[in-house]
């Protein structure tokens, strides 16, 4: 069935709720409203108020109670309305969700999925467009996943629901309804921690994820660039192997993400390439990202998010060496 | 041994009912008909501005907008009760408070076109910028109040928080600081009955939101009809006057007659009957009835007033729409100095024309 990402995520949640009686969805407006992006539409009617819970407006409370549920054998799937508001629950994630297993030597585990929309490009108000993946990836202990299409979104969410780990599941707002892909109605899994090579080529490796995947695809198609395009899909743990194999083949690495440049995921990926494939490189690794600024008000976002021109010029630069 | 260690109660009051009848015993002497007329004018103007912003959004000339329709009395009553020296701390829906405090209207429209320059709020307004993450403004408000006390300015701070906002930790932390430090902080809970799709009863099992102040040790706590501009004005004025002696909590019961924001669809979660019930309690209609009866307001006067406002609003929109953003301002205002690495990013964007267009 051709589905956009909203429908695919909704279908995944339906599959998870049907299969696992201990799965519980909670968050602001997830019940009657079906979530502000309609990801949980229809689930309240299907699974009832004890499993699809409209909570008080309290992000730390939503994540913290989810941790308590998770260590007690439930599988909570909290939704945080926007990634910018998830910082109110940051302490619960990094101080607790990330550490329960290690600090109890696996006696306690936190099987939960915190879902939240991320990134911009849709002219929303302040704090509705952040790309916070590295905050969560940096900690250790949190799985960080970010699909760029409907098929992966459903498969990754279902895979996350089988893990006994806390998963931060980031959904690019701009891609919710941008395009449709063929998505099976039944449950299936897309492996967490595995990158996907979207397109194969020999002269350049472009490593990207999230909202930048369609931007990179457009540039590569328009300019007929002979490149490997790799959607990493999981930020943590990183599929280093796929990246290094590709870079060893092409000798050039361009990393593209929407999150701001400094200390971003690109820095981590570039460092790993430097450590494991520097002698295979024909050109310095280049990162394309938003500038090292907080996400601006909507009037300025078109100057902030990397556009196709910025990606294209970076390709020129890397190919000219 | 057993003894009672706490007992408390919270009063509710309304001065002007939905039919424009005034409870003379409660009407304070400092509120005369001229004052009520001024309140009405601000509320009518606020509603006009609100409708205009909504219409601009629908035309693609504004970003996602959060309408204030229905909450004019809570905001105008509060704003007017401030003295010139007092500060206010909004969340994201207090457009009428900014209006009363004299924010240039072009800045209001510039904000809703999505530019940071709109937040260069003139010092005379004595208001903080719009704050979007719910309740996170509350500790700032306590800090601003601490600074007034520290500097002995005599000023009060009024902070706005919604019904949903009272569920956040920051709300409790802020009022607790206010209680413990005995700050000149007036917390106004603008209870508009809905936090997007969730009615207030989904936020708390408590009977009132006002009573949350009790546990913070706050002595002055009251609940008012938030659609009664006189009741709000009185509650806030008395709290501001008493702020040198400590904090207050005021819960104003009002109703979000419109959308949470223009991205919201209330028909999904609330009934028309409920909205119709609240329309009868409209904050503006009752004041008109009252002033009509006094011969101070009529349809003709209202039409003239609206016409006169229209010119002012249109010229503010014109000014806002003539604003030309400069992407360099994103870089130049991030720190007190320009780091080399940041300048390099800015210079590259200029040199390579990243801001000018896209790949053809």
Image (tube, coloured by chain):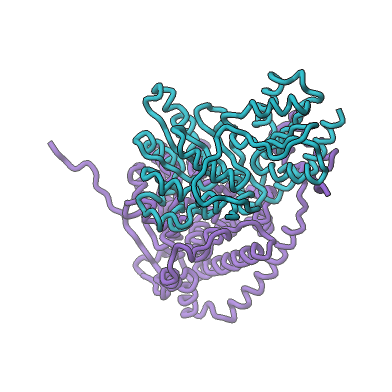
Chain colours: A cyan, B purple
Q: Nearer the viewer, residue B261 or A158?
A: A158
Q: Is residue B324 left or right of residue B16?
A: right
Whether residue B62 is visible, yes or no, is yes
Q: Is residue B134 left or right of residue A218?
A: left
How many numbered marks are there? 0
Q: Nearer the viewer, residue A14 or A59?
A: A14
A84 vs B273: above or below: above
Residue located 73% across and 48% down the image: A302
Q: Nearer the viewer, residue A164 or B300?
A: A164
Quadrant of the snapshot with the N terminus of chain B:
top left
Q: Nearer the viewer, residue B177 or A20?
A: A20
Residue located 55% across and 35% down the image: A192
Whether residue B347 is visible, yes or no, is no
A134 vs B260: above or below: above
The residue furthest right is A320
Q: Position of residue B39 (x, y in %)?
A: 52, 66
A145 vs B52: above or below: above
Q: Position of residue A139 (x, y in %)?
A: 53, 27
Q: Quadrant of residue A112?
A: top left
Residue located 45% across and 44% down the image: A78
Q: Position of residue A116 (x, y in %)?
A: 53, 44
Q: Is residue B19 left or right of residue A193?
A: left
Q: Position of residue A97 (x, y in %)?
A: 45, 32
């Amino acid at each position: 069935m051709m589905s956009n990402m909203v429908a695919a995520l909704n279908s995944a949640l339906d599959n998870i709720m049907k299969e696992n009686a201990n799965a519980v969805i909670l968050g602001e407006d997830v019940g009657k409203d079906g979530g502000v992006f309609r990801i949980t539409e229809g689930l309240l009617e299907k699974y009832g108020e004890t499993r699809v819970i409209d909570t008080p407006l309290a992000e730390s409370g939503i994540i913290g109670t989810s941790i308590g549920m998770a260590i007690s054998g439930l599988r909570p799937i909290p939704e945080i309305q926007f990634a910018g508001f998830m910082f109110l629950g940051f302490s619960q994630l990094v101080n607790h969700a990330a550490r329960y297993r290690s600090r109890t030597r696996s006696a306690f585990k936190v099987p939960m999925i915190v879902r939240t929309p991320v990134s911009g490009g849709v002219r929303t108000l302040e704090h509705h467009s952040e790309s916070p993946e590295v905050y969560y990836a940096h900690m250790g202990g949190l799985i960080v996943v970010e699909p760029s299409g409907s098929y992966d979104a459903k498969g990754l969410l279902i895979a996350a629901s089988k893990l006994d780990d806390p998963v931060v599941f980031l959904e690019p707002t701009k891609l919710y309804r941008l395009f449709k892909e063929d998505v099976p109605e039944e449950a299936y899994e897309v492996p967490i921690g595995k990158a996907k090579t979207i397109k194969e080529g020999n002269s350049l490796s472009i490593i990207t994820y999230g909202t930048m995947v369609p931007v990179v695809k457009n540039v590569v198609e328009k300019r007929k660039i002979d490149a490997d395009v790799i959607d990493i899909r999981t930020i943590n743990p990183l599929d280093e192997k796929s990246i290094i194999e590709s870079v060893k083949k092409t000798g050039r690495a361009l990393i593209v993400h929407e999150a701001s440049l400094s200390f971003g995921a690109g820095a981590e990926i570039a460092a790993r390439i430097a450590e494991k494939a520097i002698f295979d490189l024909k050109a310095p690794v280049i990162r394309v990202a938003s500038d090292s600024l907080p996400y601006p008000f909507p009037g300025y976002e078109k100057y902030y998010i990397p556009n196709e021109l910025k990606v294209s010029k970076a390709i020129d630069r890397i190919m000219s060496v | 041994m057993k003894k009672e260690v706490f007992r408390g109660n919270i009063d509710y009051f309304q001065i002007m009912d939905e039919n424009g009848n005034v409870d003379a015993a409660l009407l304070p002497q400092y509120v005369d008909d001229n004052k009520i007329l001024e309140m009405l004018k601000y509320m009518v103007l606020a509603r006009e501005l609100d409708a205009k912003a909504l219409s601009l959004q629908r035309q693609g000339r504004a970003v996602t907008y959060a309408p204030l329709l229905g909450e004019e009395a809570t905001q105008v009553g509060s704003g007017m009760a401030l003295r010139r020296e007092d500060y206010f701390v909004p969340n994201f829906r207090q457009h009428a408070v900014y209006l009363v405090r004299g924010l240039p209207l072009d800045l209001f429209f510039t904000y809703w076109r999505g530019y940071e320059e709109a937040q260069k709020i003139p010092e005379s307004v004595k208001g903080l910028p719009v704050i979007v993450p719910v309740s996170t403004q509350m500790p700032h408000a306590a800090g601003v109040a601490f600074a007034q006390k520290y500097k002995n300015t005599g000023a009060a701070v009024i902070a706005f928080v919604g019904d949903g906002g009272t569920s956040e930790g920051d709300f409790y932390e802020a009022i607790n600081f206010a209680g413990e430090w005995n700050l000149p902080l007036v917390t106004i809970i603008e209870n508009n009955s809905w936090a997007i799709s969730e009615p207030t009863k989904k936020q708390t099992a408590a009977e009132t939101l006002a009573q949350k102040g009790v546990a913070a040790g706050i002595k002055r706590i009251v609940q008012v009809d938030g659609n009664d501009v006189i009741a709000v004005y009185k509650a806030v004025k008395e709290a501001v006057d008493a702020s040198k002696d400590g904090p207050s909590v005021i819960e104003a019961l009002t109703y979000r007659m419109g959308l949470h924001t223009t991205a919201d669809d209330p028909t999904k979660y609330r009934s028309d009957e409920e909205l119709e019930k609240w329309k009868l309690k409209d904050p503006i209609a009752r004041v008109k009835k009252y002033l009509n009866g006094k011969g101070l307001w009529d349809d003709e006067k209202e039409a003239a007033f609206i016409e006169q406002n229209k010119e002012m609003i249109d010229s503010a929109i014109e000014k806002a729409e003539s604003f030309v953003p400069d992407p360099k301002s994103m870089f130049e205002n991030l720190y007190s100095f320009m780091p080399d690495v940041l300048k390099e990013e800015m210079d590259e964007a200029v040199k390579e024309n990243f801001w000018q267009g896209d790949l053809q």
